[in-house]
Amino acid sequence: MRSRYSAYALNLCDYIIETTHPEHPEYCDDRQQWKSDIERFCTQTRFDQLKIREFIDGKNTAFVTFTAFLRQADQDASFTEKSIFVFENGRWLYKSGNNSAESA
């Protein structure tokens, strides 16, 4: 999770794409369009902090609950999410997440 947050903060779009599971709702076969969408999000977002709230490790599945403190257009865009990661072909992939807006 930390590596993906850092990749967003550093605009490392290829890493985000490579670590997203094909069953994730935002997975896109049009890699150029997907990369463009990620770049737009990265450049329009200020990444202030990541706080890991809970981590449940498993052999092939892990759960991470975190809060990402973000700002977009000088507005709070923070959210809390419980993510599911699966281990496939020697790497962890982000499969899904349920999030909610973070209350101040």
Image: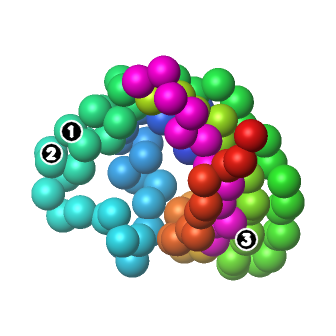
Q: Residue at (53%, 39%) from the top-left corner?
A: 77
Q: Amino acid at mark 1?
A: Ser
Where is residue 37 shown, x and y percent of the image? 25, 43
N-term-proximal mark, 3 vs 1: 1
Neighbours of disc 2 within 10 Å: few (<14), some (14-19), many (20+): few
The residue identified by callout 3 is 62
Foreground pick, 104 / 46: 104
Q: CA distance from mark 3 to mark 2?
A: 29 Å
Q: Amino acid at mark 2?
A: Gln
Q: Which residue is mark 1?
A: 36
Up/down of 9 relative to 101, above or below: above
**In which quadrant will I find the C terminus?**
top right
Q: Select label 2 or label 1 by which is in front.
A: 1
Magenta span contains residue 89: no
Badge 1: how crowded within 10 Å, few (<14), some, or many (20+)? few
Sequence-first tag of 3 and 2? 2
Depth check, mark 3 against mark 1: the one in front is 1
Q: Alpha-carbon distance for marks 2 and 1?
A: 6 Å
Q: Position of residue 2 (x, y in %)?
A: 68, 42
* Label 3 element class: strand
Q: Can residue 1 be seen from the camera position used here? A: no
Cβ atoms under marks 3 and 1 closer than 8 Å: no
Residue range in magenta is 73-85
Q: Amino acid at mark 3?
A: Ala
The vertical placement of 22 against 18, above or below, is below
- Contact (Cβ within 8 Å) of mark 2 with mark 1: yes
From the viewer's perspective, is residue 31 above or below residue 94?
Answer: above
Q: How is the image coloured?
A: rainbow
CA separation, marks 3 and 1? 29 Å
The residue drawn where x is 73% and y is 52% is 66
Q: Which residue is mark 2?
A: 32
Labelled disc at residue 89: none
